[in-house]
Amino acid sequence: MPLNVLDPRAPFVLDVRELGRRPGSMQHKTLVVHAPADLGIGGVVEVPEGSDIGLTIRLESVMEGVLVSGEARALISGECARCLDPFDDQLAVEWQELYAYPEGETDTESEADEDGLSVQDDMIDLEQPVRDALVLALPLAPTCRDDCPGLCSQCGARLEDDPSHRHEYTDPRWAALAELLTNETNESGSSGAGPTEEM
Ligand SMILES: [Zn+2]
Ligand SMILES: [Zn+2]
């Protein structure tokens, strides 16, 4: 896939011809694009493919190229890190990038494209910066809400459903001992291995 060819119909590609090259001239654009695939952190939280991403863009002509300041608003969905329930949330991020004019306009293989972003045939591609800004802002351990009580560490019960949920023995070693003692009583000492010898 050649780097230097932008598809003017691609959702993240903007035509900047109207902006002109007089430094200081400015344009504002708002658009809604569909989220591309793989915009997320593997299975934890993502911007669902095809969901709307709202973009508010300011284009500013500067000496070296086009300075783009943008805000993206997206829906994110994921799995709560505490209670494992699916949840949806909103995310808004801002970014700024300079799209440089190529050194020699006709030399499409020029080194200008190697690292930074560039204006290509009077077009710019917003996808990479939008993608980077959103992925960077995704929470690594998302929760359905700030005070999600999560799951009981012992039995996995949802604490939200049962706020007074607790176990009589909080230390698992004591819980194991209690179980042994219960068995002992029930089975009238038929087992030779008493719990007291093992302690
Ligand atoms: Zn939760
Ligand atoms: Zn429990």
Image: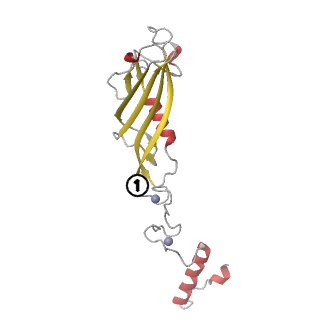
Q: Toward the viewer: 53 or 190?
A: 53
List the single residue furthest toward the left: 9
Q: Residue at x 66, y 79 (%)?
A: 198
- x, y percent for residue 100: 50, 18
Residue 143 lies, with reference to residue 20, above or below; the image says below
Which class describes the residues within 10 Å of circle 1: few (<14), some (14-19), or many (20+)?
some
Quarter containing the C terminus: bottom right
Q: How is the image coloured?
A: secondary structure
Let me know if residue 184 appears in the view: yes
List the single residue furthest toward the bottom: 188
Q: Toward the viewer: 198 or 108?
A: 108
- x, y percent for residue 113: 50, 18
Residue 3 lies, with reference to residue 149, above or below; the image says above
Q: Residue at x 45, y 72 (%)?
A: 162
- According to the image, label 1 marks what residue? 86
What amino acid is labelled 1 in the image? Pro
- x, y percent for residue 67: 49, 23
- x, y percent for residue 73: 41, 39
Q: Residue at x 40, y 55 (%)?
A: 86
Let me know if residue 35 appears in the view: no
Residue 175 lies, with reference to residue 128, above or below; the image says below
Quarter containing the N terminus: top left
Q: Is residue 19 left or right of residue 100?
A: left
Q: So how many labels did they put on this image?
A: 1
SS under mark 1 = strand
